[in-house]
Image (spheres, helix red, strand yellow):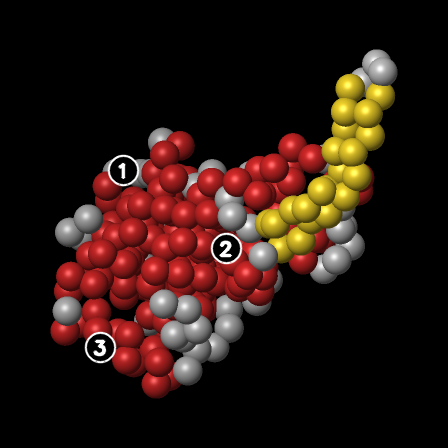
């Protein structure tokens, strides 16, 4: 962490490196490892250095997830005032860099789906913009870590009111989203059959946390 956090910070906030990170995403990891020019990107240099050639699956995955996060974070402009304020906080109080950037790296390291790193990049951008505080960032990022990606579209459909009850979807997916704290439900009907037993249909809707999650992840 001693080397990777400063390298991650530099790569994330240096506008001159944004284009290079986009090139990495377009060309792929194999091209990145073959072309030494990309090692001039601080976080790439450190990650490749850790694994010598970053040929093992673990290192390659962390590299892909990190680049996806950085590109998503930088795909929309952030107020220069807010950006400078946040960078100053990291520079004058290194404990925040360790806590906040360190947490992001740990989350990226646990991701398998690139979509999760994309969403995490959007959440972090919202945090730097002060649209959400650190506690909310931690809450929504932890939800993303536990979220089944196959349930994400259902969450968005419920948010958009395309799905309003469990007769329109698989109920076990609804239960997973409820367990994450994103949905509320209420009984719609109960049907009692001789052979199938009772079947309960429920109204479903996103709650306040679910609305915030959708708004941030769709931003």
Q: Along the polypeptide, which appears first: circle 2 or circle 1?
A: 1
Q: Are marks 3 and 2 in contact (CB under 8 Å)?
A: no
In the figure, is residue 46 to the left or right of 37? Answer: left
Asked which secondary structure carries label 1, the reply is loop
Label 2 sits on residue: 118
Relative placement, left or right, of 54 versus 65 is left
214 on left or right of 188: left
- Give percent across and percent down for residue 149: 58, 42
Quadrant for the C terminus in the image: bottom right
Q: Name the residue under label 1.
A: 51
Q: Tell which of 135 and 58 is nearer to you.
A: 135
Which residue position is annotated with label 3? 88
Mark 1 crowdedness (10 Å alpha carbons): few <14, some 14-19, many ≥20: few
- In the rendered structure, which disc, 3 or 1, sits on the residue that comes first in sequence? 1
In 3D space, how far apart are the residues under numbered discs 3 and 1 (Cα atoms)?
A: 31 Å
- The residue drawn where x is 58% and y is 43% is 177
Residue extending furthest right?
Answer: 194
State the residue lying farthest toward the bottom.
81
Q: Within 10 angstroms of label 3, few (less than 14), some, or many (20 or more) residues?
A: few
Any part of residue 180 in sight: yes
Along the viewing direction, whichever of 143 and 64 lies nearer the viewer? 143
Q: What element carries label 3?
A: helix
- Horizontal and vertical percent for residue 198? 77, 24
Q: Which residue lies at the image location 37% right of the left edge and 83% below the top edge?
A: 80
């Amino acid at each position: 962490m001693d080397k990777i956090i400063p390298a991650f910070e530099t790569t994330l906030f240096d506008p001159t490196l944004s284009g290079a990170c986009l090139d990495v995403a377009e060309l792929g990891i194999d091209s990145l490892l073959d072309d030494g020019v990309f090692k001039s990107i601080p976080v790439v240099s450190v990650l490749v250095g850790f694994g010598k050639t970053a040929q093992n699956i673990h290192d390659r995955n962390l590299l892909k997830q990190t680049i996806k996060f950085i590109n998503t974070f930088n795909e929309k402009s952030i107020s220069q005032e807010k950006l400078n304020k946040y960078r100053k906080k990291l520079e004058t109080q290194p404990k925040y860099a360790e806590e906040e950037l360190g947490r992001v790296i740990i989350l990226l390291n646990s991701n398998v789906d690139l979509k999760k790193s994309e969403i995490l990049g959007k959440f972090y951008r919202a945090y730097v913009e002060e649209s959400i505080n650190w506690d909310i960032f931690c809450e929504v990022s932890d939800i993303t870590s536990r979220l089944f990606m196959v349930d994400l579209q259902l969450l968005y459909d419920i948010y958009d009111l395309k799905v309003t009850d469990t007769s329109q979807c698989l109920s076990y997916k609804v239960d997973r989203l409820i367990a994450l704290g994103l949905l509320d439900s209420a009984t719609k009907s109960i049907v009692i059959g001789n052979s199938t037993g009772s079947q309960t249909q429920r109204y479903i809707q996103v709650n306040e946390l679910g609305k915030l999650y959708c708004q941030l992840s769709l931003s």
